[in-house]
Image (cartoon, rainbow, N blue to C red):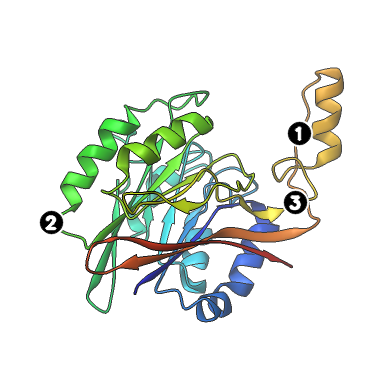
Amino acid sequence: MPNILFLGDVVGRPGRNFVIERLADLRVELDADFVVVNAENAAGGAGITKKIATDLHAAGSDAITLGDHVWDQKNFENEIEQLECVCRPANLPEQNPGRSHLIIEKDGFHLGIFTVLGRNYLALKSSCPFAMADAKIKELESLCDAVLVEAHMEATSEKVALGWHLDGRAAAVVGTHTHVPTADGRVLPGGTAYLSDAGMCGPYSSVLGRDLGQVVATFLDGRKRRFPVAEGDVRIAGCLIEIDPNTGLSNKFQRIELVK
């Protein structure tokens, strides 16, 4: 039974260092066949670089997904094509560089992976995530044994709706973006593992990974400030999903959290 370890948004140096430090051992401990990591906040809390993606891949990440901060780091649009383990959101305009999905393989089992951005409260231009998910699943069904869909969305309602929409067609629909792990992880009736948000790999003594004093002060007086990445209470958060190789759907779901 193939196992997928999915890790939520990696935030800044504290998050990526902890993931790099622990991923190889964690993979063995959880008997994970595939590791998928969202790393769109890995560089200074916003975006990613080629070096960071390469380091995460070397540490044991098979696939690296991104979100609405995909282009935040200077020159990444010129680097992404060189990174075979990285995919940008599938529902960005077609002229965006980078891969719109990934296919990874182990022992003859092929797993397709793609991300769709939500259209509620996110500024980055994107097409309908529901229509794109339908199209991508149809595109990948003859190429893969199972498909994992990442729902990078602000609105929980949009994520839940996508989960139900894809139930019985995707092995899993896992939410990211809000950095707050949710308690609704389960296998839906049709066999799709679902979680509204995997949480973040980063500092939890913070406001969504950022220095809590600076963020709270801005909520109090409304003044703009820099929000540096916090340092305390670093954790790894995500989930482990077991796939039935005969159906390409999920048998088991388990949320994962590891404290440094």
- Distance CA(mark 3)–CA(mark 2): 41 Å
- Distance CA(mark 3)–CA(mark 1): 18 Å
Three-letter amino acid code at disc 3?
Tyr
Vertical arrangement, residue 237 with respect to residue 174, above or below: below
Q: Secondary structure at mark 1?
A: loop
Q: Which mark is residue 187?
A: none
Vertical arrangement, residue 77 with respect to residue 240, above or below: above
Tell me residue 153's x, y (percent): 49, 35
Tell me residue 173's x, y (percent): 40, 48
Three-letter amino acid code at disc 1?
Arg
Q: Which mark is residue 226?
A: 1
Rendered image quadrant of residue 132: top left
Label located before the other in sequence (3 or 2): 2
Q: Which mark is residue 204?
A: 3
Q: Nearer the viewer, residue 231 or 28?
A: 28
Is residue 248 in view?
yes
Identity of the residue drawn at 86% across and 22% down: 220
Vertical arrangement, residue 124 with respect to residue 139, above or below: above
Q: Secondary structure at mark 3?
A: loop
Of circles 2 and 1, the one toward us is 2
Three-letter amino acid code at disc 2?
Ser
